[in-house]
Amino acid sequence: MLHQLLNYINDYLNGHCTLRDLQTWLLSNLQGILDSSDKTAIEMANQIDADLIELGEGLIDEAVVRERIESYARFGETIPLIFFEIERPATTHVTTAAETFRNHLEVPGPVVDLRLVHKFA
C-alpha cells in the first residue's frame, strides 16, 4: 500500500490530480492501508489525513499541506534495504603495511565545502 500511496502523492505533487482527488483516494483506501499493517503507510496516511483536517478547519492553507506532503514523500522514498547473506563467508588472510610521514601537509588554496541538491521530476 505504501507504493500506491506514494504514487498518488507523486501524482498530486506533479499536478496530475488535485488535492481533492488525493483526499478522495485516501479516504476510499484508508481501511485497506490500515489492514495492510504497513507501519510507514499507516503513519503517512494518518499525517496526511490530519493535515487535510487542519486545512478544512482553516488552520493551514494548501501551500502548507503541499509542503508537508512533499516531506512525507521524501521520507517515504528512503526505504531501508536489507541484505541477507547467501553464502557462508570464507576465511581470508590479509596483511597490510603502513608507512607514516611527519611532513607538514599544505593545502594550496581555500577549502570549499560544496553542497549538491538533487531534485527528481
Image (spheres, grey):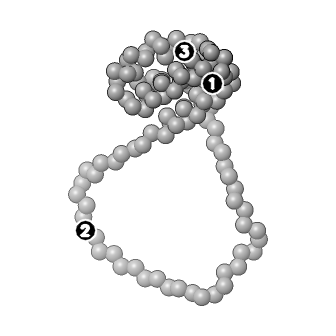
Left or right: residue 44 compared with residue 54: left
Pointer 2 with pointer 3, Cβ within 8 A: no
Residue positioned 57% across, 19% down in the render: 52
Q: Which residue is mark 1?
A: 65
Residue 42 horizontal/vertical position (percent): 42, 26
What amino acid type is highlighted by mark number 3?
A: Gln
Which residue is disc 2 drawn over?
A: 91
Q: Earlier in the sequence, mark 3 or mark 1?
A: 3
Q: CA distance from mark 2 to mark 1?
A: 54 Å
Label 3: element kind: helix
**Is residue 12 among what the camera can see?**
no
The residue at the far bottom in this view is 102
Q: Amino acid at mark 2?
A: Thr
Eye-nearest disc, 2 or 3: 3
Residue at the farthest left position: 88
Q: Which residue is mark 3?
A: 23
* Quadrant of the snapshot with the C terminus: top right
Considering only order in the chain, which callout, 3 or 2, is on the residue closer to the N terminus? 3
Question: Between marks 2 and 3, how big is the CA–CA gap?
Answer: 56 Å
Q: Nearer the viewer, residue 43 or 96?
A: 43
**Rendered residue at 69%/24% (across/down):** 63
Crowding around mark 3 (Cα neighbors within 10 Å: few <14, some 14 to 19, many 20+) is: some
Q: Residue at x 51, y 27 (%)?
A: 47
Q: Secondary structure at mark 2?
A: loop
On screen, residue 87 above or below 98: above
Indicate the position of residue 48 as horizontal and vertical percent values.
Answer: 53, 24
Q: Nearer the viewer, residue 115 or 93?
A: 115
